[in-house]
Structure formats: C-alpha cells, structure tokens
C-alpha cells in the first residue's frame, strides 16, 4: 500500500487541511508552560546526552499521536530492527544499511551475510585516523612538498552543511580550513575559495542517489569559467 493510500496518512492530511492554519507557535507556548518538557526527550549515551526537541515545530499532542500511528503503520519500527540486524533493507542497491556500523563505538558485532563487518570497519577507521593525524600535523605533504592548509570537498545535498558542522567542531585544528561546496555550477563559482593554491587538499566525497548520478553524468563537459 502506497503512503497516500494509508488511512493514517489520509487522516493526517485531512487534519492539516482543516486545522493546521490555526496553529501558532507563540500561542502554543503561551497556553502551555510545559510545552518544552512535553515535546522533547533526551537520549542518554556514554558520550553525552542528545536532546531531541519537537516543541518548536507546529505540532500538538493530537498531531504527534497521528504521526506516531502513521510511523507504526508504515513499519518504521520493523525497518529499524532490520537495519540493526544487518538485513538488506536498501532495496535500491540490494544491500544492508551500515551507517550504524560506522558509529558503533561499542563494537557490538553487526553481521551481514553471516559475517561481522566491524573488524573491517575498524581497520578503515584506524587508517583514516592515521591519515588525518598526518595531515593535521603537517607530516603529510601535497605534491608541492608543502603542508596541507585547506580541505575542499564536492558534495551533494545536505552533506555540505553536515561536513561544515563536523569539521568546524574541531577548533584545535584551526590551521586547516574545511570548505564544502555543492555540486552545482552556481555554488562552485560563488565559492570564495575557488582559486586553489597549490597547498590545497582536494577531497571528493561520493554519496549519490541514482538521480544525482544521472544528473552528474549528463554534464557535457568539465566546468569552465570564461
């Protein structure tokens, strides 16, 4: 059953059309002094707490109930469990979704086709760590023999902002300037770092949807600027 045919979705859609226009953020906070505590939760982890705050969205208790009911009807909980068990839920590529393995700091085994993927994940992460240390310390040189000062990445969609948030959190390595640019001609030419000094480290991150690959492959020629 498609999403638009799901009764839970239809109920939510009808509610939106008839009542959503009456929701006002300021009024909802004024009417309920406990709104933040009602519409937020904290996930406690060994590496610090993660706050999930829904209170600043245009939702009320009725809407949240409908959203949760729709999520259950769409099998979100089952998909979550399959993801953590290594089942191949990425039907587009026919493989497991292993984002969780890259963030599995507990090293709990994650089996795909009967094999624990964590040893290989840890091997690659250790290799990345060693490389990053060499770049940050200046030990790793570019082709010019000079230390790397800039990391320039071409990325799609939200990966641009995500990279900036992660890279700029490491303030102790301020000698490196991370630059993320979306793969569009306008975005590239508007970048103030487009003129690469020879000390640049060019990092290309591939994380493409099939539609994005088709779009990228349709370029008739390499980008040039007259």
Image: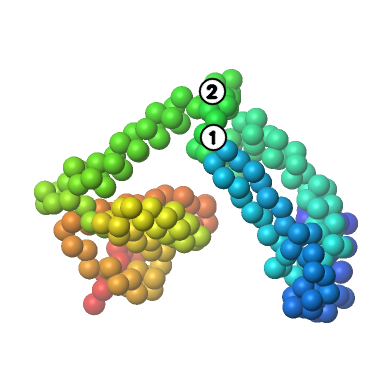
The relative height of residue 16 versus residue 76 in the rendered view (above or below) is below
Horizontal and vertical percent position of residue 123: 39, 28
Q: How far separated are the C-alphas under marks 1 and 2?
A: 12 Å
Viewer-proximal residue, 49 or 206? Answer: 49
Bin the neighbour count of mark 2 within 10 Å (Cα to Cα): few under 14, some 14-19, many 20 and up. some
Left or right: residue 184 compared with residue 212: left
Residue at horizontal 29%, vertical 41%?
Answer: 133
The location of residue 149, given as percent across then percent down, is: 23, 56
Q: Is residue 218 visible?
A: no
The residue depicted at 33 percent of the width and 53 percent of the height is 172
Name, please, the residue furthest toward the top: 114
Numbered mark located on residue 116 in the image: 2
Compared across the picture, whether 169 is left or right of 15 comes to left
Quarter of the image where one finds residue 184: bottom left
User: Residue 154, relative to residue 99: is it above or below?
Assistant: below
Using the image, determine if residue 89 lies above or below residue 50. Answer: above
Q: Quadrant of residue 35?
A: bottom right
- Which quarter of the figure is the C terminus placed in? bottom left
Frontmost residue, 158 versus 217: 158
Residue 97 occupies quadrant = top right
Which sits in the foreground, 35 or 130? 35
Tell us which disc is closer to us: 1 or 2: 1
- Give the label on residue 104, or none: 1
Please name whichever residue, 23 or 84, is drawn nearer the observer in this view of the structure.
Answer: 23
**Residue 66, percent from left and from top:** 85, 58
Q: Mark 2: which secondary structure?
A: strand
Q: Residue at x 81, y 47 (%)?
A: 72
The mark total stands at 2
Label 1: element kind:
loop
């Amino acid at each position: 059953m498609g999403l638009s045919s799901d009764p839970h979705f239809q109920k939510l859609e009808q509610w939106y059309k008839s009542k959503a226009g009456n929701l006002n953020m300021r009024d909802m906070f004024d009417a309920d002094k406990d709104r933040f505590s009602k519409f937020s939760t904290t996930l406690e982890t060994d590496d610090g707490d993660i706050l999930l705050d829904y209170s600043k969205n245009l939702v009320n208790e009725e809407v949240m109930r409908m959203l949760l009911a729709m999520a259950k009807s769409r099998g979100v909980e089952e998909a979550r469990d399959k993801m953590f068990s290594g089942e191949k839920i990425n039907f587009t590529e026919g493989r497991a979704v292993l984002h969780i393995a890259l963030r599995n700091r507990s090293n709990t085994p994650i089996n795909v086709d009967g094999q624990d993927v964590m040893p290989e994940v840890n091997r690659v992460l250790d290799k990345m760590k060693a490389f990053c240390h060499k770049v940050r310390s200046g030990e790793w040189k570019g082709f010019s023999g000079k230390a790397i000062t800039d990391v320039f990445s071409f990325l799609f969609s939200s990966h641009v902002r995500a990279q900036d948030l992660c890279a700029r959190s490491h303030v102790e390595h301020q000698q490196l300037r991370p630059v993320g640019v979306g793969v569009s001609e306008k975005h590239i030419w508007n970048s103030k770092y487009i003129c690469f000094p020879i000390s640049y480290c060019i990092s290309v991150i591939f994380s493409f949807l099939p539609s994005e690959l088709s779009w990228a492959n349709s370029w008739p020629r390499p980008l040039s600027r007259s």
